[in-house]
Image (tube, rainbow, N blue to C red):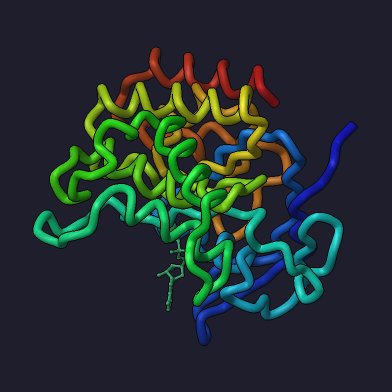
């Protein structure tokens, strides 16, 4: 049984005269692990900002957990790690634990001090992402991969049901990326989190997710075309491209 938690119904959005989204129709079901892919400027971040209620569609409608977005109140269910969260000033005196605690404040509401339950949850989340040993370290001292986990931990601290990651591996080295995708898989399968992973890196993402949504202002209805999926086609690595295409086709 599919349980739709996000529904985009004919959503269009323009920044002034610049059209960013055109008649987007898509559904995200509970338990999905979706790769939202498309070239730079395709409207990926815009679509997520519409989902989060930060931008209002010019036309069309968004439904969250079966409710019209205007009536939706359970924002703590949706965790969001924004693009380029890894750029962090190394000298900024904030610890891992403090950043993760911010996720808890968002949940508790500003003004309420963190209680025993909050502290417990922060500890759990730090363990979950493997940062419990570095809880007191400054975020800026950590590697790119570890910093990314700090921001994910912050999102997880509010107990989301849906976690959206916008280009999370930008600036993360290949080895940490591998570990990172393993971690996401674990969140999806063992912690039953619905994941949306945004990326322009089709190759890597297609190997990890269970469903691809291809966007270029609109969502490609019939899956992703080979030209769309494989901008690297031009770069003559034909064999590799064929492998990716087969893998992705298999998932559709
Ligand atoms: N704040 C903004 N004001 C005007 N145009 C914007 C703004 N943000 C994004 N755009 C434009 O909207 C289009 C989609 O951008 P974006 O959603 O950021 O794409 P992606 O995340 O896929 O790279 C691009 O053409 C971009 O230049
Ligand atoms: Mg973007």
Tell me what residue is drawn at x 67 percent, y 76 percent: 57
How many numbered discs sit on the rendered protein?
0
Residue nearest the viewer, comparing 135 with 141 = 135
Q: Quadrant of residue 172?
A: top left
User: How far across and how far down the image is residue 19, in percent?
Assistant: 55, 74
Q: Position of residue 10 (x, y in %)?
A: 77, 65
Residue at position x 31%, y 24% in the image? 236
Is 88 situated above or below 132?
below
Q: Quadrant of the N terminus?
A: top right
Q: Residue at x 25, y 22 (%)?
A: 175
In this rendered view, identify the residue nearer to me: 126 or 117.
117
| Left or right: where 235 falls relative to 224 | left
Residue furthest bottom as drawn: 16
Q: Is residue 38 above or below residue 32?
A: below
Viewport quadrant of the C terminus: top right
Quadrant field for ligand 2: bottom left
Please state which of residues 79 and 64 is positioned toward the viewer in this rendering: 79
Q: Position of residue 50 (x, y in %)?
A: 61, 68
Residue that appears at 65% across and 78% down: 56
From what the image shows, is residue 238 above or below residue 145?
Answer: above
Q: Does residue 37 appear in this view?
A: no
Q: 106 and 239: which one is in front? A: 106
- Whether residue 205 is visible to the viewer of this picture, yes or no, is yes
| Position in image of residue 226 (x %, y %) | 53, 31
Q: Is residue 64 left or right of residue 54?
A: right
Q: Is residue 235 above or below residue 37?
A: above
Name, please, the residue furthest toward the left: 91
Quarter of the figure with residue 109: bottom right
Q: Is residue 37 left or right of residue 102?
A: right
Residue ranking furthest to the front: 116
Would you identify the image quadrant in which residue 213 lies?
Answer: top right
């Amino acid at each position: 049984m599919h349980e739709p938690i996000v529904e985009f119904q004919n959503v269009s959005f323009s920044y002034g005269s610049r059209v960013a989204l055109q008649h987007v129709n898509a559904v995200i079901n509970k338990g999905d692990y979706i790769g939202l892919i498309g070239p730079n400027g395709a409207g990926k971040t815009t679509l997520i900002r519409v989902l989060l209620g930060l931008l209002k569609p010019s036309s069309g409608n968004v439904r969250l957990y079966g409710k019209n977005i205007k009536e939706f109140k359970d924002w703590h269910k949706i965790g969001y790690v924004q693009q380029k969260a890894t750029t962090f000033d190394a000298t900024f005196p904030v610890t891992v634990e403090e950043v993760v605690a911010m996720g808890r404040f968002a949940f508790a509401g500003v003004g309420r001090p963190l209680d025993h339950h909050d502290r417990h949850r922060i500890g759990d989340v730090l363990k979950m992402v493997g940062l419990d040993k570095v809880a007191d370290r400054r975020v800026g001292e950590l590697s790119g991969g570890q910093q990314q986990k700090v921001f994910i931990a912050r999102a997880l601290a509010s107990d989301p049901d849906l976690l959206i990651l916008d280009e999370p591996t930008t600036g993360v080295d290949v080895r940490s990326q591998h570990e990172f995708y393993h971690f996401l898989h674990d969140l999806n399968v063992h912690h039953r989190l619905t994941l949306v992973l945004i990326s322009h890196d089709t190759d890597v993402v297609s190997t990890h997710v269970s469903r691809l949504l291809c966007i270029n202002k609109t969502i490609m209805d019939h899956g992703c075309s080979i030209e769309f999926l494989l901008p690297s086609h031009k770069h003559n690595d034909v064999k590799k491209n064929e492998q990716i295409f087969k893998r992705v086709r298999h998932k559709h």
